[in-house]
Amino acid sequence: MVGVRKSADGFLVQAMLLLCMLWGFQQVAIKLAAPDLSTLTQVLLRSAIAALLVAALMLRRDAWRQVPPTWLAGLLAGALFALEFLFIALGLRHTAASRMAVFLYTSPIFSALALHLLLPSERLSPLQWLGIGLCFAGLVMAFGLGAGEGGAQLLGDAFALLAGFSWGMSTVAVRCTSLSEAPPGLTLFYQLLVSVLVLLGFALAMGGFQPLNFTAVAVASVLFQGVIVSGFSYFAWFWLMRRYLAAQLAVLSFMTPLFGVLFGVLILDEPLTPGFLIGSLLVLAGISLVSGADWLRRRWRALSV
């Protein structure tokens, strides 16, 4: 059994730096391989590979006995997870990877608002409401002043925001159902398995497998997403969650969109307009206030003593 969770230390900062770099590179990897392998095919294969890895790990840990009381909640969380990656795949066809990275990470705003309505223990504080206001002001600026490619990019941005919403609702589903007491690996398996089924059905219905060329870049992108991100990094995240304070992890995780923007600009040569840059900073500031409000209050009290 894990004891009292620790505050941030040097190891945590280094570990989160690595994880955020991996997560920030996800959208760039999908975009790089898109000329050879459709974005929908990539996220489908990613989920399939990761589901097999998680299933193998669960067989070793005998976690399957938790399935009977959790399968219905698992289907709900899995459907929302599938929508998240469907919207990511659709969004990256129209918008930049850097923009996807920022809009996707609005998910804590949506989960915080939903939990505020559903659970008395999750009521938002004034500082968190300020963060939500900053976030939405940033979204208006990023959408209105940062869009340089017309309607197509706005459509991609909207899909990115829907992906963030779906991710946030998936978090709420886990928090408010029997999955809150289930092993993290089982929750992840539900999400991955259902996403494979939903994405496969959508691809077959829409003919979304083209282009389908398994070049070195395409294979590397799928393996990176399926093994490194969905396998290694997610389990590393769960391991850190069991040992460190959640609020501090949440604050550190918002390095991810910064890396997403950086990699998009440096690797894909994506434009970085002033409106999008200012809007993104407002969004990230707002998300940090919402997710790190408790930690910020504790730090303020400690400095005031």
Image (cartoon, helix red, strand yellow):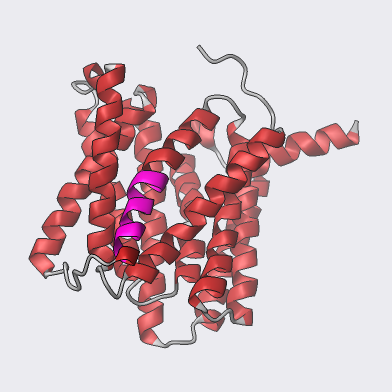
Query: Residue 257 at what x, y percent from top left?
Result: 55, 59
Q: Residue furthest right?
A: 305
**Residue farthest along the front direction in this orientation:** 216
Residue for point 35% across, 45% down: 227
Report the number of discs.
0
Question: Residue at (53%, 62%) from the top-left corner?
Answer: 260
Above or below 97: residue 180: above
Residue 4: x and y in percent read 62, 17
Residue 222 inside the magenta-drawn segment: yes
Question: Residue 165 is drawn in which quadrant?
Answer: bottom left
Q: Is residue 109 visible?
A: no
Specify the quadrant of the image occupied by residue 159.
Answer: bottom left
Query: Does residue 200 appear left or right of residue 146 in this picture?
Result: left
Residue 4 in sight in this render:
yes
Q: Nearer the viewer, residue 217 or 139?
A: 217
Q: Does 109 sit above or below residue 88?
A: above
Residue in view at x 37 percent, y 59 percent: 163
- Residue at point 65% right, 55% down? 130
Extent of the magenta region: 218-229
Is residue 225 inside the magenta stretch?
A: yes
Placement of the C terminus among the 4 image quadrants:
top right
Residue 260, relative to residue 268: is it above or below?
Answer: above
Q: Is residue 241 above or below residue 44?
A: above
On the image, the x and y values in percent for residue 156 come to: 37, 74
Would you say 59 lies left or right of 164 here? left
The secondary structure that most of the magenta stretch takes on is helix
In-image side of 43 versus 303 (left or right): left
- Residue 8 is left or right of residue 59, and the answer is right
- The image shows residue 273 at horizontal and vertical percentages of 59, 82
* Name of the residue lying farthest toward the left: 205
Q: Nearer the viewer, residue 305 or 68?
A: 68
Residue closest to the eye, 26 or 155: 26
